[in-house]
Protein backbone atom coordinates (compact mmCIF):
# COMPACT_ATOMS: atom_id res chain seq x y z
CA UNK A 1 0.00 0.00 0.00
CA UNK A 2 1.19 3.55 -0.57
CA UNK A 3 2.78 5.33 2.37
CA UNK A 4 1.38 8.61 1.11
CA UNK A 5 -0.86 9.73 -1.70
CA UNK A 6 0.45 10.23 -5.19
CA UNK A 7 -0.74 12.49 -7.96
CA UNK A 8 -0.01 11.20 -11.48
CA UNK A 9 -1.06 12.74 -14.78
CA UNK A 10 -1.15 11.62 -18.41
CA UNK A 11 -0.52 14.06 -21.24
CA UNK A 12 -0.22 14.09 -25.00
CA UNK A 13 -1.73 15.06 -28.32
CA UNK A 14 -5.30 14.08 -29.10
CA UNK A 15 -5.42 10.42 -30.09
CA UNK A 16 -2.08 9.55 -28.44
CA UNK A 17 -3.62 6.69 -26.47
CA UNK A 18 -3.15 8.22 -23.01
CA UNK A 19 -6.67 7.39 -21.80
CA UNK A 20 -6.19 3.69 -22.57
CA UNK A 21 -2.77 3.74 -20.88
CA UNK A 22 -4.13 5.51 -17.86
CA UNK A 23 -6.84 2.87 -17.41
CA UNK A 24 -4.27 0.08 -17.69
CA UNK A 25 -2.05 1.74 -15.09
CA UNK A 26 -5.01 2.22 -12.75
CA UNK A 27 -5.97 -1.45 -13.14
CA UNK A 28 -2.40 -2.66 -12.51
CA UNK A 29 -2.09 -0.50 -9.40
CA UNK A 30 -5.44 -1.71 -8.07
CA UNK A 31 -4.29 -5.30 -8.55
CA UNK A 32 -1.30 -4.39 -6.41
CA UNK A 33 -3.68 -3.30 -3.65
CA UNK A 34 -3.51 0.45 -4.17
CA UNK A 35 -6.51 2.69 -3.82
CA UNK A 36 -6.71 4.51 -7.17
CA UNK A 37 -8.96 7.41 -8.09
CA UNK A 38 -9.23 8.38 -11.76
CA UNK A 39 -10.16 11.85 -12.88
CA UNK A 40 -10.15 13.84 -16.11
CA UNK A 41 -9.55 17.39 -17.28
CA UNK A 42 -11.69 19.13 -18.16
CA UNK A 43 -14.26 17.21 -16.15
CA UNK A 44 -13.81 14.87 -13.25
CA UNK A 45 -16.40 16.60 -11.07
CA UNK A 46 -20.03 17.37 -11.83
CA UNK A 47 -19.21 21.06 -12.18
CA UNK A 48 -16.16 20.21 -14.28
CA UNK A 49 -18.36 18.07 -16.53
CA UNK A 50 -20.66 21.03 -17.14
CA UNK A 51 -17.63 23.18 -17.97
CA UNK A 52 -16.33 20.46 -20.32
CA UNK A 53 -19.56 20.59 -22.32
CA UNK A 54 -19.21 24.35 -22.78
CA UNK A 55 -15.56 24.02 -23.80
CA UNK A 56 -16.02 21.27 -26.37
CA UNK A 57 -19.35 22.37 -27.86
CA UNK A 58 -18.78 23.27 -31.55
CA UNK A 59 -21.59 25.85 -31.17
CA UNK A 60 -19.09 27.85 -29.06
CA UNK A 61 -16.76 28.44 -31.99
CA UNK A 62 -16.55 32.13 -31.12
CA UNK A 63 -15.16 31.52 -27.62
CA UNK A 64 -12.18 33.77 -26.97
CA UNK A 65 -8.83 32.22 -26.02
CA UNK A 66 -8.83 33.90 -22.60
CA UNK A 67 -12.32 32.69 -21.70
CA UNK A 68 -11.31 29.24 -22.88
CA UNK A 69 -8.20 29.18 -20.69
CA UNK A 70 -10.06 30.43 -17.62
CA UNK A 71 -12.72 27.75 -18.04
CA UNK A 72 -10.07 25.02 -18.15
CA UNK A 73 -8.63 26.40 -14.92
CA UNK A 74 -12.05 26.75 -13.30
CA UNK A 75 -12.71 23.05 -13.90
CA UNK A 76 -9.25 22.26 -12.50
CA UNK A 77 -9.70 24.35 -9.34
CA UNK A 78 -12.84 22.33 -8.58
CA UNK A 79 -10.98 19.08 -9.29
CA UNK A 80 -8.24 20.08 -6.81
CA UNK A 81 -10.78 20.78 -4.05
CA UNK A 82 -13.16 17.94 -4.70
CA UNK A 83 -10.91 15.08 -5.78
CA UNK A 84 -7.13 15.55 -5.92
CA UNK A 85 -6.43 17.07 -2.52
CA UNK A 86 -8.85 14.99 -0.42
CA UNK A 87 -7.91 11.71 -2.13
CA UNK A 88 -4.14 12.17 -1.89
CA UNK A 89 -4.51 13.32 1.72
CA UNK A 90 -6.28 10.02 2.40
CA UNK A 91 -3.33 8.13 0.88
CA UNK A 92 -4.88 7.30 -2.52
CA UNK A 93 -3.19 7.46 -5.89
CA UNK A 94 -4.97 10.00 -8.10
CA UNK A 95 -4.44 9.67 -11.84
CA UNK A 96 -5.67 12.49 -14.04
CA UNK A 97 -6.25 12.35 -17.78
CA UNK A 98 -4.62 15.75 -18.57
CA UNK A 99 -3.78 18.61 -16.19
CA UNK A 100 -2.17 22.07 -16.36
CA UNK A 101 0.46 20.77 -18.80
CA UNK A 102 -2.36 20.53 -21.36
CA UNK A 103 -3.11 24.21 -20.82
CA UNK A 104 0.59 24.93 -21.17
CA UNK A 105 0.71 23.06 -24.50
CA UNK A 106 -2.73 23.89 -25.99
CA UNK A 107 -3.32 27.44 -24.74
CA UNK A 108 0.24 28.56 -23.89
CA UNK A 109 1.72 27.29 -27.18
CA UNK A 110 -1.20 26.32 -29.43
CA UNK A 111 -3.10 29.54 -28.81
CA UNK A 112 0.14 31.45 -28.20
CA UNK A 113 -1.07 32.91 -24.90
CA UNK A 114 2.36 32.34 -23.40
CA UNK A 115 3.58 30.11 -20.62
CA UNK A 116 3.92 32.88 -18.04
CA UNK A 117 0.17 33.40 -17.98
CA UNK A 118 -0.38 29.65 -17.62
CA UNK A 119 2.02 29.57 -14.66
CA UNK A 120 0.27 32.45 -12.94
CA UNK A 121 -3.19 31.01 -13.41
CA UNK A 122 -1.98 27.63 -12.23
CA UNK A 123 -0.88 29.23 -8.96
CA UNK A 124 -4.33 30.72 -8.50
CA UNK A 125 -6.34 27.65 -9.53
CA UNK A 126 -4.20 24.83 -8.13
CA UNK A 127 -2.61 26.66 -5.19
CA UNK A 128 0.66 24.79 -5.37
CA UNK A 129 -0.80 21.39 -6.18
CA UNK A 130 1.44 19.87 -8.86
CA UNK A 131 1.60 16.36 -10.29
CA UNK A 132 4.30 14.17 -8.74
CA UNK A 133 4.83 12.41 -12.04
CA UNK A 134 3.59 13.20 -15.54
CA UNK A 135 3.69 10.65 -18.35
CA UNK A 136 3.70 12.29 -21.76
CA UNK A 137 2.60 9.74 -24.37
CA UNK A 138 4.36 11.04 -27.44
CA UNK A 139 3.11 10.26 -30.94
CA UNK A 140 3.83 12.07 -34.19
CA UNK A 141 1.50 14.71 -35.55
CA UNK A 142 0.33 12.64 -38.53
CA UNK A 143 -0.90 9.82 -36.31
CA UNK A 144 -2.61 12.26 -33.98
CA UNK A 145 -4.45 14.07 -36.78
CA UNK A 146 -5.56 10.82 -38.42
CA UNK A 147 -6.84 9.38 -35.15
CA UNK A 148 -8.67 12.60 -34.27
CA UNK A 149 -10.29 12.57 -37.72
CA UNK A 150 -11.58 9.02 -37.38
CA UNK A 151 -12.68 9.70 -33.82
CA UNK A 152 -14.65 12.73 -35.01
CA UNK A 153 -16.52 10.52 -37.43
CA UNK A 154 -17.65 8.31 -34.57
CA UNK A 155 -18.19 10.48 -31.50
CA UNK A 156 -21.05 12.71 -30.51
CA UNK A 157 -20.88 16.05 -32.27
CA UNK A 158 -20.58 17.97 -29.01
CA UNK A 159 -17.16 16.61 -28.09
CA UNK A 160 -15.18 18.01 -30.99
CA UNK A 161 -14.54 21.75 -30.78
CA UNK A 162 -10.87 21.29 -29.85
CA UNK A 163 -10.40 18.70 -32.60
CA UNK A 164 -11.24 21.24 -35.28
CA UNK A 165 -8.00 23.18 -34.98
CA UNK A 166 -5.47 23.58 -37.77
CA UNK A 167 -2.32 21.59 -38.30
CA UNK A 168 -0.21 24.62 -37.33
CA UNK A 169 -2.02 24.71 -33.99
CA UNK A 170 -1.12 21.08 -33.25
CA UNK A 171 2.49 21.64 -34.32
CA UNK A 172 2.69 24.28 -31.61
CA UNK A 173 1.00 22.00 -29.06
CA UNK A 174 3.62 19.34 -29.75
CA UNK A 175 6.37 21.93 -29.42
CA UNK A 176 4.83 22.87 -26.06
CA UNK A 177 5.12 19.29 -24.81
CA UNK A 178 8.73 19.05 -26.02
CA UNK A 179 9.66 22.25 -24.20
CA UNK A 180 7.90 21.10 -21.05
CA UNK A 181 9.77 17.78 -20.98
CA UNK A 182 13.05 19.66 -21.51
CA UNK A 183 12.28 22.12 -18.72
CA UNK A 184 11.05 19.60 -16.15
CA UNK A 185 12.87 16.36 -16.97
CA UNK A 186 12.41 14.87 -13.51
CA UNK A 187 8.65 15.26 -13.40
CA UNK A 188 7.68 14.97 -17.07
CA UNK A 189 8.69 11.64 -18.57
CA UNK A 190 8.30 11.09 -22.30
CA UNK A 191 6.87 7.70 -23.20
CA UNK A 192 7.18 6.58 -26.81
CA UNK A 193 3.54 6.15 -27.92
CA UNK A 194 4.34 4.08 -31.02
CA UNK A 195 3.55 0.37 -31.18
CA UNK A 196 0.82 -1.79 -29.67
CA UNK A 197 -1.13 -0.88 -26.55
CA UNK A 198 0.82 -3.58 -24.68
CA UNK A 199 4.19 -2.28 -25.86
CA UNK A 200 3.34 1.26 -24.81
CA UNK A 201 2.07 0.03 -21.47
CA UNK A 202 5.38 -1.72 -20.76
CA UNK A 203 7.05 1.67 -21.16
CA UNK A 204 4.45 3.37 -18.96
CA UNK A 205 4.93 0.77 -16.24
CA UNK A 206 8.72 1.01 -16.46
CA UNK A 207 8.55 4.81 -16.09
CA UNK A 208 6.23 4.48 -13.10
CA UNK A 209 8.45 1.90 -11.41
CA UNK A 210 11.51 4.02 -11.96
CA UNK A 211 9.73 6.96 -10.35
CA UNK A 212 8.55 4.77 -7.47
CA UNK A 213 12.03 3.42 -6.79
CA UNK A 214 13.34 6.95 -6.31
CA UNK A 215 10.32 8.20 -4.34
CA UNK A 216 11.34 7.71 -0.72
P1 LIG B 1 -9.47 14.93 -24.22
O1 LIG B 1 -10.04 14.61 -25.56
O2 LIG B 1 -8.09 14.38 -24.01
O3 LIG B 1 -10.40 14.63 -23.09
O4 LIG B 1 -9.24 16.52 -24.17
C1 LIG B 1 -10.20 17.40 -24.59
C2 LIG B 1 -9.63 18.50 -25.44
O5 LIG B 1 -9.37 19.65 -24.62
C3 LIG B 1 -8.32 18.17 -26.13
O6 LIG B 1 -8.40 18.60 -27.48
C4 LIG B 1 -7.29 18.98 -25.40
C5 LIG B 1 -8.08 20.15 -24.90
N1 LIG B 1 -7.54 20.78 -23.69
C6 LIG B 1 -7.01 22.06 -23.76
O7 LIG B 1 -6.97 22.67 -24.82
N2 LIG B 1 -6.54 22.65 -22.61
C7 LIG B 1 -6.58 22.03 -21.41
O8 LIG B 1 -6.15 22.59 -20.39
C8 LIG B 1 -7.14 20.69 -21.34
C9 LIG B 1 -7.21 19.97 -20.03
C10 LIG B 1 -7.61 20.11 -22.50
Image (spheres, helix red, strand yellow):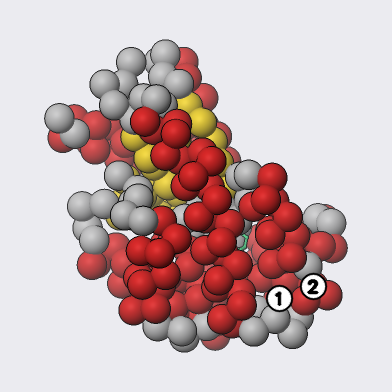
Looking at the image, residue 126 lies above or below residue 8: below
**Residue found 30% across the figure and 40% down from its top:** 207
Relative to residue 171, is residue 91 drawn left or right? left
Quarter of the render that holds ligand 1 = bottom right
Relative to residue 158, is residue 72 drawn left or right? left
Q: How many marks?
A: 2
Looking at the image, residue 9 lies above or below residue 74: above
**Residue found 76% across the figure and 80% down from its top:** 61
Relative to residue 206, is residue 102 drawn left or right? right
**Residue found 36% across the figure and 72% down from its top:** 120
Q: Which mark is residue 68?
A: none
Question: Marks 1 and 2, Cα distance to the nearest angstrom?
Answer: 9 Å
| SS state under label 1 | helix
Disc 2 crowd rating (10 Å Cα; few below 14, some 14-19, many 20+) is some
Task: Determine the image quadrant of residue 133.
Answer: top left
**Residue found 29% across the figure and 26% down from its top:** 4
Q: Nearer the viewer, residue 212 or 149?
A: 212
Q: Quadrant of the C terminus?
A: top left
Mark 1 vs 2, N-terminal side: 2
Please say if the residues under marks 1 and 2 sit with CB atoms less than 8 Å apart.
Answer: yes
- Residue named by callout 1: 164
Instruction: Determine if the C-beta at disc 2 is less than 8 A from ligand 1.
Output: no
| SS state under label 2 | helix
Q: Which mark is residue 58?
A: 2
Q: Quadrant of the N terminus?
A: top left
**Residue 123: x %, y % from top left:** 35, 64
Disc 1 crowd rating (10 Å Cα; few below 14, some 14-19, many 20+) is some
Looking at the image, residue 118 lies above or below residue 47: below
**Residue 206: x %, y % from top left:** 30, 35
Amino acid sequence: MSRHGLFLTFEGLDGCGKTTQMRLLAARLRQAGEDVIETVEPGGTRIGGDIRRILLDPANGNMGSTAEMLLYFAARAQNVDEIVNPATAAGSIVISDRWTDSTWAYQGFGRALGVELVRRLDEIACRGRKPDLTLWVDIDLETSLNRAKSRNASVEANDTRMDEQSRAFYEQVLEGYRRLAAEEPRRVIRVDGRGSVEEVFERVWAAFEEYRSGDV
